[in-house]
Image (cartoon, grey):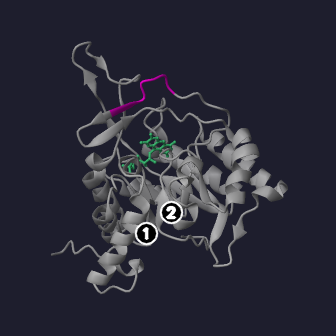
Amino acid sequence: MPRGITLRDPLLLASGCCGYGEEYAELVDPASHGGVITKAVSPEPRAGNPTPRLCETPAGLLNCIGLQNPGVEAFAAEIMPRLTARGTSFIVNAVGHSPEEFARVVARVEQVLASDPACAPRLSAEGVNTGLCGYELDLSCPNVESGTLFATDETVLARTVELGRRETERLLVAKLSPNVTDIVPFARCAREAGADAVTIANTFNGVSIDIATRQSNLARPSAGLSGPAIRAATLYHVWRCHRALPELPILGSGGITDADSAVQFLLAGATALQLGTGLFLNPRLVPEIQAGLSAYLDAQAEPDLRAIIGTYRDQG
Ligand SMILES: Cc1cc2nc3c(=O)[nH]c(=O)nc-3n(C[C@H](O)[C@H](O)[C@H](O)COP(=O)(O)O)c2cc1C
């Protein structure tokens, strides 16, 4: 990870797919994976969208949760100290209605870090960063009004990243939208505005219609598609971004459901991986992918995962 952050493992739990990581801790030890990217945190509490908010598709999941969360004050006062005490490495997924609101979340968390010793990030005996490790700006949620605008308008994207950057010296990741023809200009824009890394990517826009009522199967007319259905398309964006901007660290997110797909993202150029919908299909996904990655390295006689990043033989 950039900014000198050392995580235990390149596998992270994607935002929104395991709350704040506490529920999932009952199934898989937080000390066994890279860390948790929290559910979105906004300046004020948000109720999210009405139900139904989830709908299965043949190879994926549509969701329109709508960034439900208790707001930054409750997060900082109640959730952050618990995660820190537990020794979880976590990244705060920040959202807002404007660039200034994103920055407010980052600024408020930084204030609490400076004033509350219970929230101070730590370094474990093995040299792993625990507690808060940085921020992921969710520039790309399709489930709120103008959600993707932050990631598909370069002026707004640059301003959001710049304002967030002013508030913190820690790791700052820009989570991009896959709903673009070419992701490279947006990744470049995020980097030039001060992002240390990009997450590629959030969910794709999707629709599911009840043919009897001719209405949406969800509470909104469209929603965000995740899971195996988006894997190949997300992988395309990762590959394109890595080829154009090889120095920019990429967190791959989109349809990783087994070791094979995890390896594909690394070969395409991702330096860390986020597990989302795959966790709903298989709660034991983390240890299974870890075992599969080790087996792959052995079979390919590679020393470590770093050695395979970006080694997709796209020239034949
Ligand atoms: C139920 C659900 C809630 C999500 N909530 C958020 C969120 O709050 N913030 C965010 O940046 N991404 C959110 N996402 C997107 C995921 O973090 C991830 O980027 C996306 O689902 C693609 O990865 P996957 O195919 O492995 O699920 C959510 C996804 C799902 C399925």
Q: Is residue 86 left or right of residue 216?
A: right
Looking at the image, which residue is at 23% across and 39% down?
58
The range drawn in magenta is: 49-55
For the question of whether residue 11 can be seen, the reply is yes
Looking at the image, which residue is at 33% across and 56% down?
257
Residue bearing mark 1: 271
Q: Quadrant of ligand 1?
A: top left
Q: Earlier in the sequence, mark 2 or mark 1?
A: 2
Residue bearing mark 2: 197
Q: CA distance from mark 2 to mark 1?
A: 10 Å
Residue 50 is one of the magenta-drawn residues? yes
Vertical placement of residue 294 versus 66, above or below: below
Looking at the image, which residue is at 31% across and 67% down?
268
Task: Determine which quarter of the picture holds residue 232.
Answer: bottom left
Residue nearest the viewer, comparing 155 with 228? 228
Instruction: Tell me, yes or no, whether the two marked residues, 2 and 1, touch with CB atoms within 8 Å.
Output: yes
Count residues near mark 2 (Cα–Cα under 10 Å), then give few for <14, some for 14-19, many for 20+: many
